[in-house]
Image (tube, grey):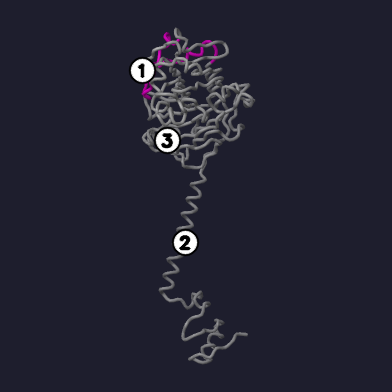
Amino acid sequence: MKAHHRGRFGDNVNLVNLVNDYPPSYGYGTPSRGLRWDPRVWSRKTWIGVTIGAVVLSVVIIVAAVLGSRANRYPSYTKLNYALRDTYQGTAFFDKFDYFTGYDPSQGFVHYVDGPGSTQLNLTYATDTSAILRVDTSEVDASTGRKSARIESKTQYNSGLFVFDIVHTPYGCGTWPALWLADPANWPRNGEIDVVEAVNTATTGNHMTLHTANDCTMNAKRKETGKVLTKDCFNGTDVNAGCGVQGSADTYGQALNSNGGGVYAMEWRTEGIRIWFFPRSSISPDLRTGDSPDPSSWGTALADFPKTDCSINDHFRNQSIIANIDLCGQWAGQALYYTQQAGCPGTCSNLVATNSTAFEDAYWEFKSFKVYGVS
């Protein structure tokens, strides 16, 4: 039973309120808390305010839903059936490559030697079981730069599954080795995929990076175990840092080599570019047999570059497989990386010029490269 309050209007006010089932009004003409929430007594001003509030709330909900949906966008990496297309292996390994001999675009303190010269200096040679690419250690005075090799596959690719079986990765002060794909004549328009790359003593693990023309970023959802370093792939951002992912220490250098090396597999397709690493002791069985590798069975990739905010088909074309060992240059030669991070002695160029023994571990050893296409 409602209590009655005798105000200036006496019990008439309360009778009206009781008839309408409103709580009694306490005070001179002041609506109760319940009246404030009853739309039947709202003024025009109140209605306008409520309407505006409802519109604003609806917009916030819609925007949040859209942003949430965008944040969760991710391509469907459905299973593809792969068949072997090209094999780089055995004594003929280097026959399928051209030798780069021009000026080093990365401003390295290096002389890239042609095919016959590399054979003569033992910079490149192959046996039935492996292929070697190395830095020259014979020249005592390399005052204009030390000799090395850079090879580029004669075949260019536009997609595929690339399997690189690596026994030994180069490392040591002043070195900048890389195993990558690019179209050097049309860079950065046709993109660059760095599968294996490191500098100097290389104790921080492998760096996997994309470099592109404008309008390619990796801000969206990704599924990878590596550490994201940068997200803008555009070569004009951060002095061409690209969008990079870093592996653990045992994915490159002395740590990798002491474990017998391993296999890097890179899948390049419309949905995205993904890179896996398998230590020698745990290579996926379908990679051991090599018949029809199935990336959908390999679990989470080490690096994942989905197409969400980067059209893979537009940014990557006509790629050659490239392997090289640069010296100093725009990355390895910087004081931040050469001196502060790696603790290397003197200056990079002086070490390269005068200390040939510093490059005894500066060599790639490959068992094979295999390229698969969709069957």
The answer for how far apart the CA atoms under marks 1 and 2 are is 62 Å
Residue at numbered disc 2: 57
**Tag on residue 233?**
3
x 50%, y 50%: residue: 68
Give coordinates of residue 35: x percent, y percent.
Answer: 51, 78
> Dot 1 lies on which element?
loop
Residues packed near mark 1 inside 10 Å, few (<14), some (14 to 19) or many (20 plus): few
Q: Are marks 2 and 3 in contact (CB under 8 Å)?
A: no
Comparing labels 1 and 2, the label whose residue is closer to the camera: 1
The answer for how far apart the CA atoms under marks 3 and 1 are is 26 Å
> Dot 3 lies on which element?
loop
Residue 271 in view (yes/no): no
Question: Which of the pair 374/199 is nearer the observer?
Answer: 199
Q: Are marks 1 and 2 in contact (CB under 8 Å)?
A: no
Q: Which residues are magenta?
A: 89-118
Label located before the other in sequence (1 or 2): 2
Image-based side of 347 in relation to 224, left or right: left
Residues packed near mark 2 inside 10 Å, few (<14), some (14 to 19) or many (20 plus): few
Label located before the other in sequence (2 or 3): 2
Asked if the stretch drawn in magenta spans residue 232, the answer is: no
**Tag on residue 102?**
1
Quarter of the N terminus within the rendering: bottom right
Quarter of the C terminus within the rendering: top right
